[in-house]
Image (spheres, rainbow, N blue to C red):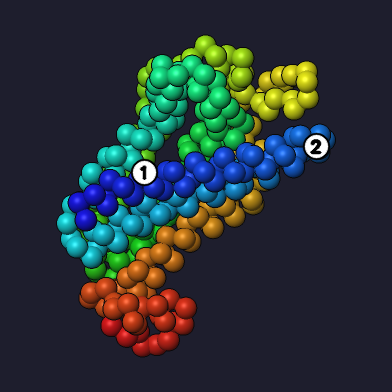
Amino acid sequence: PLLMPLILPLVTSLIEVFWVWWCDKHFRELVFDRGVTTDQFTALVVPIAIAHGNAEVTRLASLLIGALTTGSYDWVSSVLLAFCLNVCVRHRWTQHAAATMLFWYSPELGERLAPWLACTLADQIHLEVKTYFGYCRFLFPFALALARINKGLPAFFSESAGLCLVVAFVLEVLEDLIVNFGGLPRGRMPAYFDEMDDSCESPFDPRRFTLRSAGAEETRVHCLAMQGSRRLHPRLILTIFALVSLAVPCLLEIMLGVGFIEGQCEHPIAPSKRLGQTFLWHRPVEC
């Protein structure tokens, strides 16, 4: 139990990174390598945005569930670790450290594994969507807190859970301020990577990295700054926000029960009852 708050951010981050890599791999194979001429950018932005949003939802919901069921403050270490990891990743410090250590240990092995560490278009989109799609997960918890206050109930069930929600939101805002306006140095990859990728230092840099040609002769076409989700239709952005934000109540109701989330039950509902309540909202709700 003491290690779970530390393992949670690492596991969710690894799953998120794997999904981004998988999307980038298939985008290259099905779109770029085949020379598709029409705009297929949406096919890459949307799944990465949903993957990041759902990863953040899983982290937040897991911490809230732990705080609600135990009343402890074990979530503090998990929130702080996730904050530090996100700052390091978005400044490319983790990528820089991994590449530096790899080339220091074995230059031959470093060159062999370099394509796995090189910056790609999917990486840049991933950095970009971290700026705003992480806020989707806070829509339902804050709306639930306002509804509970309107009913005369405690804002968010317990002091630990309420503090967890507030701290997570404050750190999310602080993270974006540090990354976008903090002026911290960004990790510089070893010289070997200069031949593999372009600037790729900031998602706000107008000299953004783009996909390389798969042919014998490389071509580089610079991208416009913030070309990711700002190119999407507002309805599509709202759809992504809805899909991600609705995942929070789903997880809370599955793990705690509909009656508890609605404020009709004082304690979380037993597993034998709450699973049925999640899919069949019969009345009155069994506590």
Residue 194: image quadrant is top right
Q: Which mark is residue 10?
A: 1
Percent of width and height locating residue 154:
22, 64
Report helix, strand or loop for mark 1: helix
Percent of width and height locating residue 92:
44, 25
What residue sits 74% from the left and 19% below the top? 218
Q: In the visual, does 157 lie left or right of 193?
A: left
Quarter of the image for the N terminus: give it.
bottom left
Mark 2 vs 1: CB contact within 8 A: no
Q: Which mark sits nearer the N-terminus, 2 or 1?
A: 1
Can residue 128 be seen?
no
Comparing 23 with 72, the one in front is 23
Residue type of the residue flagged with mark 2: Arg
Judge whether 233 appears above or below 162 on screen: above
What residue sits 66% from the left and 26% below the top? 210
Task: List the residue tagged with mark 2.
Answer: 34
What residue sits 29% from the left and 77% below the top? 269
Judge whether 179 appears above or below 160 on screen: above
Can residue 90 be seen?
yes
User: What is the C-alpha distance between the residues marked 2 and 1?
Assistant: 35 Å
Mark 1: few/some/many CA within 10 Å (<14, 14-19, 20+): some
Judge whether 236 appears above or below 214 on screen: below
Q: In the visual, does 210 lie left or right of 276?
A: right
Q: In the visual, does 106 lie left or right of 155?
A: right
Percent of width and height locating residue 196:
61, 19
Report helix, strand or loop for mark 2: loop
Judge whether 24 appears above or below 192 on screen: below
Quarter of the image for the C terminus: give it.
bottom left
